[in-house]
Structures are given as C-alpha cells and as structure tokens.
Image (cartoon, rainbow, N blue to C red):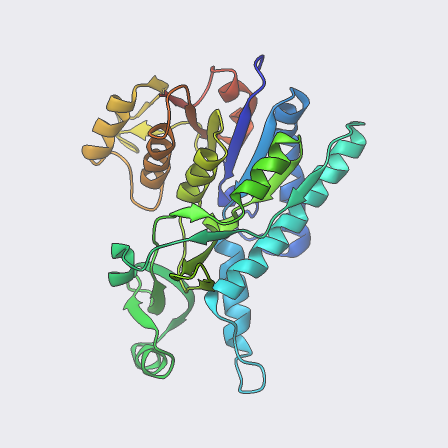
Amino acid sequence: MNKKRTIVVALGGNALQRQGEAASEQQQRVADETVRQLLPLIQAGHNVAIVHGNGPQVGNIVLHEEAINTPDVPSLPLEDSGAMSQGLIGFWLQQAFHDAFMVNQMNNRAVSVITQTIVSLSDPAFQNPTKPIGPFYSEDEAKTVASERGYTVKEDAGRGWRRVVPSPKPQTIVEADVIKALVHAGVTVVSTGGGGIPVLQDETGQLKGVAAVIDKDFGAAKLADLLDADTLLILTSVDAAKINFGKSDEQSLGEVSIEELQKHIDDGQFAPGSMLPKTQAALSFLDGKSGRTAIITSLDKTAEAISGSAGTIVKS
C-alpha cells in the first residue's frame, strides 16, 4: 500500500448483516467489525469512499411499512424506504468510523451522504421488472395488490408471490461532485447506498423518485468513474471470483486481463445476481480510463488485495 490512491469500496450485504442477526445492535456490531478491516486503508493515507448494499435493511423497512399500511398511516413509496435505509446504514458506519478514529488517535472524519442516482425510463429494465421486494403473497392476494396498487407481481421460486421492480443501470450520480470534494479533502464518505436512490430527471432538470432498485456494484462502479478513482474494491463473501464454481475443477481467478474476464462472462461462468454483476461492474469501471484497477475479494483480504497479493485483480 505504498502509493496514495482514491479507493471506492463496495460492501456486500454480509459486511452489514449476518444470517439471523437483524436487530439494530447486531448490525451495528457487524459494522464495527467491517470498519476495523477497512481502517488500514485510511491509515495508509488512501482516500476512501464507501458504497454499501441495503437489500436486507430496505426489505425490513418495506415489511414494516406493509404491516402498518392503513389510510391514516399509508406505506411509503419504495424510493423513500431506500432513502431511510441509506440514513440508517450511514449512521451505523459513520459512527463506527468515528469511534475507530478516536481509539486509534486519528484526526480523520467520516460522513454519510444521502445519494440520488439518475436512471432512464428507456432502460429495458422498466419493461421487465425482476427484482423481488417486500412480503410474500398468495396468488389471490398478489392479484388484489396488483390491481389496487399498480404493482407488478411474479411467483418467486415456488415460495409465493411478490412484488417485483425494475433494476435499471445508473446513468449518473446527482451528488457526485460533493462526494468528490469531500473524498479529495480526506474525508471518508459513505454514499450511494443500495446503488443510490433511483430518480428520473425531466427536461427541466427536476428530479422525481421512481420505484426501482439499482445494483449496488454498478452504483459503486459509476461513483468510482465519476470520482476518477484509482481502484474499485468490490468486497463479497468469497476471496476471489471463481470459474467452474462448486465443481471439482473450481479455480480462483487471480490477476486476469479484461479480455479473460470478459470471456468468462460470455461463457456463463458467473451466476446472475451474485458474481456476474460484480464482474460486469468491474469491467464498466475499467472501461472509463486506462491506469485503473478493479479488485474482487472478501472483507478479510482487503489489505492483501490492495497490495496485490489476494483477490481477483483486473487492470486497464
């Protein structure tokens, strides 16, 4: 970790919530552990921006909203729930950073930024919503909800029916210039949570939230591009991208070329909704400029991956 870099870190859901640990105190404890793993990057002098997933948290907020949905207390739109999750997770992380800086006698600051990400209605995702959100319904309940509230509903792997929403690609991030100024000033910034709150921009430049979910890794790649970051570090539950995953000839990918990684994508080596968007996001960041590095690894391998000795590493 010699050269000072600007690093955008994309945190997977496991970095904030573990299976069966949904209570706020438990999630804050996980956030503390996550920050301890990231602290060496800041101690080494790198400028760091954090992007986090919000799937479990926004899912819980939606379940709460649906449970109390009455004429007097109507449930909030999905984009509002996304904003609430950004504030909640941002609070956990910036508090964890504050405490870690104090314990280590570091004169650093951390802040979270509620972030809006512009998407386009012409994105094909709006014609084919696929992202399940909220509670399970019986088929009859689902049809009622669809007709009364205008939801698109689909059967979810034989477990029941759920609302599905689009997952469009991010076009740009409204607050990117503010985030860039803070990061370049040495502030650790938590932003673009859950890929950012999806918004549409009209011809006059006005913004309006839309019910959609942006993939967090694509949001992180877009932020990294807009910040002109040196490194996009995508942290997940495995220490590297793997080919022939789960088979006897499974192989971890170390440093690979853009062409090699693209070939593995084309060959269907990575699962949709899992490693596929991470590899695609890595390539989209690298496509923006030469001299960039994208890394896919696990949280506990962060320091080794930044030094080049762990993870899947791709350079432009």
Q: Quadrant of residue 257?
A: top left
Q: Nearer the viewer, residue 300 or 196?
A: 196
User: As displayed, is residue 300 above or below residue 193?
Assistant: above
Q: Position of residue 149 (x, y in %)?
A: 38, 79
Above/below status of 11 relative to 20: above
The residue that appears at 37% across and 25% down in the rendered structure is 289
Considering every residue shown, the one lying at the far top of the view is 2
Query: Could you tell whether 258 is left or right of 106 in the image?
Result: left
Q: Residue at x 54, y 56 (%)?
A: 57
Q: Which residue is located at x 65 percent, y 21 percent?
A: 45
Q: Quadrant of the C terminus?
A: top left
> Measured from the top left, where is residue 280 in percent x and y?
32, 36
Q: Quadrant of the N terminus?
A: top right
Toward the front, the furthest residue is: 204
Q: Quadrant of residue 163?
A: bottom left
How many labels sit on residues?
Answer: 0
Spot occupied by residue 273 in the image (x, y as percentages of width and height): 34, 46
Between 305 and 159, the residue placed more toward the observer is 305
Could you tell me which residue is drawn at 39 percent across and 48 percent down? Answer: 170
Can residue 236 be seen by looking at this rendering?
no
Q: Position of residue 105 (x, y in %)?
A: 81, 27
140 left or right of 55 in image: left
Taking the view exactly as shown, the residue that stands out farthest to the left is 267
Residue 271 seen in render: yes
